[in-house]
Image (tube, grey):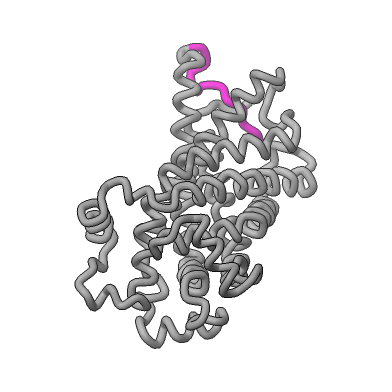
Amino acid sequence: QHYKSITFIEGMLDEKYRWIAECFRDTMAGVFGGITAVYSTQPLDTTKVKMQTFPNEYRSVIVTLSKTFKQEGIRGLYAGSIPAVLANVGESAVAFLAYGRISSIAQYMTGSKSHQELSLLSQAFCGAGSGACASFVLTPTELVKCRLQTQYITGKAAKGIPTTPFAMFMHIATKEGPLKLMRGWTPTLLRETWGYFYFFGGYEAAKKVLMKDPDEISLWKTAVSGGVGGTMCWGFAYPIDVVKSQVQVGSLSPLNAMKNIYSEFGYKGFFRGITPCLMRAFPGCGALFVAVDYTKLAFDKVVFKPY
C-alpha cells in the first residue's frame, strides 16, 4: 500500500504543519540511518583512517585489522565510534532533511509534482546541496573521531591527551581554540558536495533500474540501491577524504597535505585505504537507506493517511 503526504485529519492541518511533519520525518530517518550505518561497519572505518594517515605502518586491510586488535583489542576497532555515531547521525539528519527540502524547491522551480518527476541530474544536484549543508555538522565530529582513531599510533595517548570523545572535543576547543574544531572544513565541504552528488544520484539511478514503481518499498532493492550510491560516493570522493584525514590528524594545510601525499607516494597515495572504505560503503550505505526508507514508511503509517 502506498502513502501520500496528506495529514492524518484531513483539512485540519495546513501546508505549513505538513511541511514541519515532513521535516521531522526526514530528520529522524537520517538519525536512525546514521546509527545503523556506523555500528555495522565501524572497524573498517578505523582501518581506513589508519591506512590513510600511517601508510608505512598499515599496508593492508588484514594487517591493520589484526594489528589493531592485537594491540588495542575490540575497543581499538571501535575507537571513535561515539563521535562517529554523532558525526553520522548529524550528517545523515542534516543531509536527508536538506535533500528533502532542496528537492521541494527544485520541484517548485521546475513545476514537477513530486520528487520522482525530477530528472536524475536534478536529484543529484539536490544531493550535492545536502552534502554542503552536512559538512558544517560533520567537520568537528570527524576531527574528534580521527584524532581518537590515530592517537595510539602518534603516542599522544601516553602523553596525557584525552581518550574520550567529549574530553578530546574540549581539549581541542581549549588548547587549540574553538575555531580549530572546524579544521579540515574545506576538504570536508568538497568531499561532501562532490560525494553526495553521486551518493543520491547513484541511489536514485539504481532505484529507477530496480523499481518500476517509484513509490515501491523493497528491502533488498533499497539495500542494493543504497549500496550503489555509497560505493559511487566514496569511489569518486575518496582522494579528497585522504587529504581531509591528513589535515585533521596533522598540522598541514590542504594544499601542503596534497603535495606531501604525492611527493611520498605518488598518485597511489590518494587511494590508500580505499579497499576497506569500499568494503564498508556498500553494506553500510545499504543499511543506511533501508533504515531511512523504513523509518519514513513507519512515520507515514502513523502520521499520514493512506489512500
Which quadrant holds the N terminus? Answer: top right
Task: Please report the residue visible at 48 percent of the width from the left and 68 percent of the height from the top.
Answer: 49
Where is residue 164 drawn, in percent x and y?
26, 64
Is 9 colored magenta in this rendering? yes
Q: How many labels does the image show?
A: 0
Instruction: Find residue 276 and report its image quarter.
Output: bottom right
Q: Can residue 233 be seen in this view?
A: yes
Q: Return the residue nearer the eye: 266 or 270.
A: 266
Residue drawn at 27 percent across, 56 percent down: 172
On the picture, is 297 further left or further right than 115? left
Residue 187 lies left or right of residue 128; in this view the side is: left
Magenta residues (range): 1-11
**Residue 182 spot, x, y in % from top left:** 37, 48
Give me the residue at 33% from left, 50% from top: 181
Residue 86 seen anywhere in this rendered image of the structure? no
Give yes or no for residue 292 being in the magenta stretch.
no
Image spot of residue 296 (x, y percent): 53, 39
Residue 79 relative to residue 211: left or right:
left
Residue 229 vs residue 173, the one in the foreground: 173
